[in-house]
Amino acid sequence: MRQWLAKDAQAGTAVEAARARALGTLSVCLTLLSVLATFYTLYFASAIVLPFVLAAVFNLLLSGPMRFLNGRLRVPKPLAALVLILLLFGIVGGIGAAISVPASGWISKAPQSLPALQAKLAFLNAPIQAAQDGMKKLGDLMDQTGGPHVTGAQVIQVQSSNTSGLTSVGSSLLLGTRFFLGQVFTVLLMLFFFLYEGDSLLRRFVEIMPTWADKRRTVQIASEIESNVSLYLATITGMNLLVGAANLVQCWLLGLPNPLLWGVVAFLLNYIPILGPLTGVVIYFFVGLFVFPSVLHALVPPAVYLGIHFLEGETITPMLLARRFTLNPVLVMASLMFWDWLWGIPGAFLSVPLLAVFKIICDHVDSLTAIGHIVGGAPRERGATSWRTRLKS
């Protein structure tokens, strides 16, 4: 009898363990499906979600001036919000008007400068020809193994489709411009209501929290998000202004035409981590090729640009943001690639603030603290020992 009872107990324990494993697997699968559904929604509803997120981030940047106007100067909230939005729109519009004429001039004269550019880059003809020969051999090998063949009818069809595509460029540009202006108007409208009723919305959200601990945690998360992200955006904007001014001066000293244009380009590209400065190096190199007679001379502007970026990105900005805003560089790069794939250039701009918001939420939720610890980066301190040394000691 005792043996039968022992066997029944063991069987019951095995059943409970199998049921627990099944529930754990089901929970993981449901979580994975929920995450995929969220990404799917963010991708296909970007026309609705992206202006909302951009307005929320700009609201964090303008929260300090909004409090100053409304709290110190006693300006009514609607008027203060309208003044800040008009000021932001005026700055962006002024910058766009200042650089539109020289930018269009560079675009218009680019085709005439291509022969000179090809002559300066003639030393690259041999490597490019070798790469083309290799691609041709690979294509021949694929054809021999049953790859797709292009017939004359297909070529004619492609050419006709290209011709019809060229005729629709004008309408596509008009549609794109209308869509862009609509998105800008939506962002400004959402930003106005964030500035006007953002505190009221947060207060209502806190009121529906079931317990006092949940209310306090919500307020802590909102306060930390506002302070850290606004500090990051204000610091980065100030540093980007200095980077743009430094590049404007170096372009003026080196004799590049339209130094204001290249200073603004450096200012805007510096908002996008890693990829922005790399794009700036390429742009400055080709601008140098268009202006200067030799390739060696054309390397000077991108070299100075890269030196300015390293001074700002590796020394000054980390020193200003240390201990308050540290993120893992690997996850910063992963976040940049993901949001750039999802939302394009606006997503690349939002990648670091969104990762910071995610870390702050993880730090205040008990079940996500481990993820928050992984997302956070170690503060940069002189003379600090590595984590391996600390573990050994």
Image (spheres, grey):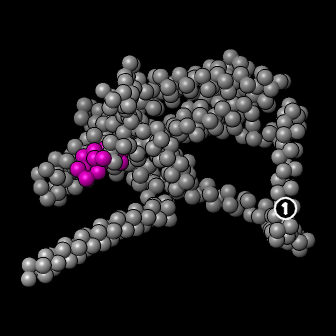
Residue projecting furthest to the right: 152
Q: Residue at x 24, y 35 (%)?
A: 71
Task: Please say whether residue 296 is one of the residues in the magenta stretch.
Answer: no
User: Residue tagged by mark 1?
Assistant: 141
Image coordinates of residue 282 in percent, x first then y, are 69, 35
Task: Please say whether residue 369 is one of the residues in the magenta stretch.
Answer: yes
Magenta stretch in the rendered image: 357-370
**Res 280 → quadrant:** top right
Q: Residue at x 71, y 22 (%)?
A: 300
Q: Residue at x 32, y 32 (%)?
A: 391
In the picture, measured across the screen, residue 334 lies left or right of residue 258, that is left
Residue 320 in sight in this render: no
**Res 243 → quadrant:** top right
User: For numbered disc 1, what is the local secondary structure?
Assistant: helix
The majority secondary structure of the magenta stretch comes to helix
Residue projecting furthest to the left: 1
In the picture, measured across the screen, residue 46 lies left or right of residue 382, that is right
